């Protein structure tokens, strides 16, 4: 009898305790500080991984309003107005047009909100115009240097890639969005690194595939019909376009015994890693989506809670108020390094 009473008491107490515990902010959602996040377009292979990392990292900490700017800067400007009306504490902005930072900064200033730009680096003048603006990304030139070094090493190790035996590397280059700091720097430094390494090059074609697989394939289709076997190297500013080029080459009967054309990309997204594993891509350069997404949320979380931007964090800011996540060469030897960053 006595025991039953105790059991009953314990039960009642436990139940009332549970009943009295207020909903945690994580459960109610609305009690977490709000952050307005834009992605320049959801339909971008690499950005879908950054988006995933942002959402994962924000869980239980921040109430994200995350929108697709659909590659339309005017639309993004309106989305930012909407965030401000909604009362977000921080803006995390992946610009559509890298030159449009000042328009966003003007809005942020009026509302006295901090802004963390990411992936598309604003001009230094825009960054300097607002003490509450920061950037999370990479050092764009580094990806070009690493890609160039990879091309150089592989070229020197494979004399048969010089198909016409003239000692010159005839290449085609798939460029990302013109004016995008990553596209400009990768294009410049990849080629420059090869040349500085002592290999002569000849540019057969250079056009923008706008970071896009289908556009990369279309350009490659045209180039193959124009140049055929004269193409000795495909340099792509990102993996999405590298994969498009690969599809095109395969359809034209290349990439089989004796008809190999080397392709090198940037990002090291999972689809590209699979092709490196199959021996169809020479390599890529890890653009660390996981850590870039994490850094965006780490900074935004501090700012949303009124803390100093770097409080308690291991990230460092350079003189441009930028956190720069390092790139890394990825080949058959170290595929696992890239898999971790993409949550694989
Ligand atoms: C990535 C591209 C991506 C672009 C979007 C670059 O850093 O390498 O794959 O399309 O960012 O802005
Ligand atoms: Ca040649």
Image: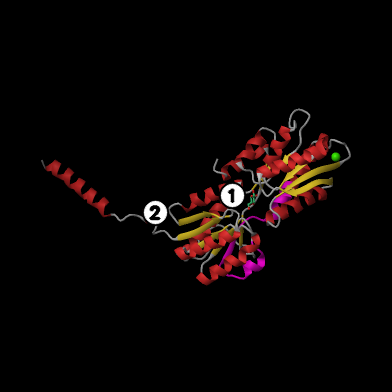
Determine the image quadrant of residue 281: top right
Q: Position of residue 270 (x, y in %)?
A: 60, 40
Mark 2 vs mark 1: give the one in front. Answer: 1
User: Residue 297 vs residue 168: left or right?
Assistant: left
Q: What residue appears at the point 72 percent right and 55 percent down from the top-left corner?
A: 184
Q: Say whether residue 239 is magenta.
A: no
Front residue of this view, candidates 54 and 82: 82
How busy is the neighbourhood of tag 1: few (under 14 within 10 Å), some, or many (20 plus)? Answer: some
Q: What residue appears at the point 50 percent right and 59 percent down from the top-left corner?
A: 36
Q: What residue appears at the point 54 percent right and 50 percent down from the top-left corner?
A: 51
Labels 2 & 1 near each other (Cβ < 8 A): no
User: Residue 226 vs residue 268: left or right?
Assistant: right
Q: Which mark is residue 115?
A: none
Residue extending farthest to the top is 257
Determine the image quadrant of residue 275: top right
Front residue of this view, candidates 243 and 21: 243
The quarter of the picture where the N terminus appears is top left
Q: Which mark is residue 26?
A: 2
Q: What residue appears at the point 41 percent right and 58 percent down from the top-left corner?
A: 32
Q: Secondary structure at mark 1?
A: helix
Q: Report the magenta residues as a range.
A: 122-147
Q: Which residue is mark 1?
A: 47
Residue 305 in view of the camera:
no
């Amino acid at each position: 009898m006595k025991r039953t009473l105790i059991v009953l008491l314990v039960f009642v107490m436990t139940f009332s305790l549970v009943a009295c515990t207020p909903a945690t902010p994580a459960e109610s959602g609305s009690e977490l500080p709000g952050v307005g996040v834009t992605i320049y377009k959801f339909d971008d292979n690499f950005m879908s991984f950054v988006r995933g990392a942002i959402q994962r990292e924000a869980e239980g900490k921040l109430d994200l309003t995350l929108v697709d700017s659909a590659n339309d800067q005017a639309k993004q400007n309106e989305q930012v107005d909407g965030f401000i009306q909604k009362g977000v504490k921080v803006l995390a902005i992946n610009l559509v047009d890298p030159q449009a930072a000042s328009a966003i900064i003007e809005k942020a200033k009026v509302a006295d909100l901090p802004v963390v730009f990411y992936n598309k680096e604003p001009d230094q003048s825009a960054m300097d115009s607002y003490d509450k603006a920061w950037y999370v990304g990479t050092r764009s030139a580094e990806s070009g240097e690493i890609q160039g070094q990879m091309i150089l090493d592989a070229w020197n190790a494979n004399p048969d890639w010089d198909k016409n035996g003239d000692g010159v590397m005839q290449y085609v280059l798939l460029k990302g969005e013109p004016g995008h700091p990553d596209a400009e720097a990768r294009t410049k430094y990849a080629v420059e690194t090869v040349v500085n390494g002592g290999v002569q090059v000849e540019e057969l074609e250079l056009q923008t595939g706008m970071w896009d697989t289908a556009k990369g394939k279309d350009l490659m289709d045209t180039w193959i019909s124009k140049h055929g076997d004269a193409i000795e190297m495909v340099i792509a500013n990102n993996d999405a376009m590298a994969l498009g080029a690969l599809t095109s080459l395969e359809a034209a009967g290349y990439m089989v015994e004796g008809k190999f054309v080397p392709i090198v990309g940037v990002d090291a997204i999972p689809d590209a890693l699979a092709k490196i594993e199959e021996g169809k891509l020479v390599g890529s350069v890890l653009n660390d989506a996981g850590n870039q997404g994490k850094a965006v949320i780490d900074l935004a979380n501090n700012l949303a809670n009124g803390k100093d931007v770097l409080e308690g964090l291991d990230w460092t800011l350079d003189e441009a108020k930028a956190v720069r996540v390092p790139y890394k060469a990825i080949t058959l030897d170290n595929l696992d390094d890239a898999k971790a960053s993409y949550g694989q």
